[in-house]
């Protein structure tokens, strides 16, 4: 019976670590996917003026902005004559792992680049 009493807190810590690593890795995967999607959307957009808005909306949907894996999202696009680079950052909520000595949140970042479609039809 003493073994159970000693192992219960260790099991709780192990469970908290699993939640912590799952949140961080889930957040990273979603952010990388959102960056790829946003870069592709901007590279194929016919209207550069609305491309950033469309890409931001798609990225917010992809990461599930407001969920524990992404409380707040930022998207920073960089457009050159040849390519589009997008950096997406999210604040991952780590409050579920409160018994571990970690911060309450962590920022994960993903970057993706796409070559601009030189033959796309312009808007209008």
Image (cartoon, grey):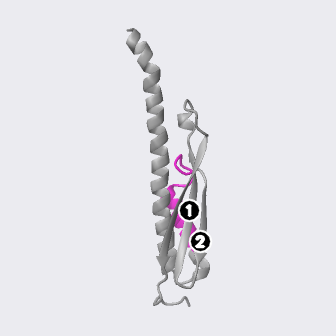
Quadrant in which residue 85 is drawn:
bottom right
Q: Residue furthest top?
A: 1
Element carrying mark 1: strand
- Residue at x-position 47% and y-position 35%: 17
- Residue at x-position 45% and y-position 23%: 10
Residue in front for this viewpoint, 47 or 116: 116
Element carrying mark 2: strand
Whether the residues at callouts 2 and 1 have beta carbons within 8 Å, the answer is: no
Which residue position holds label 2?
77
- Residue at x-position 53% and y-position 49%: 67
Q: Which residues are magenta?
A: 52-70
- Horizontal side of 14 relative to 46 (left or right) equals left
In the displayed structure, 111 sits above or below 71; it is: below
Quadrant in which residue 75 is drawn:
bottom right
Quadrant that contains the N terminus: top left
Quadrant that contains the C terminus: bottom right
Disc 1 residue crowd, few under 14, some 14–19, many 20+, Cα 10 Å: many
- In magenta segment, residue 53: yes
The percent coordinates of residue 47 (x first, y second) are 56, 83
In the displayed structure, 95 sits above or below 109; it is: above
The percent coordinates of residue 5 (x first, y second) are 43, 13
Give the main secondary structure, helix, strand or loop, of the magenta stretch. helix
Disc 2 residue crowd, few under 14, some 14–19, many 20+, Cα 10 Å: many
Which residue position holds label 1?
88
């Amino acid at each position: 019976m003493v073994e159970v009493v000693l192992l219960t807190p260790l099991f709780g810590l192990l469970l908290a670590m699993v939640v912590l690593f799952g949140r961080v890795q889930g957040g990273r995967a979603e952010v990388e996917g959102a960056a790829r999607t946003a870069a592709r959307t901007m590279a194929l957009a016919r209207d550069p003026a609305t491309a950033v808005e469309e890409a931001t909306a798609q990225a917010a949907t992809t990461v599930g902005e407001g969920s524990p894996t992404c409380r707040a999202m930022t998207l920073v696009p960089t457009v050159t004559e040849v390519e589009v680079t997008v950096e997406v950052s999210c604040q991952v909520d780590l409050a579920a792992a409160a018994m571990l000595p970690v911060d309450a949140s962590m920022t994960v970042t993903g970057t993706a680049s796409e070559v601009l479609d030189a033959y796309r039809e312009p808007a209008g």
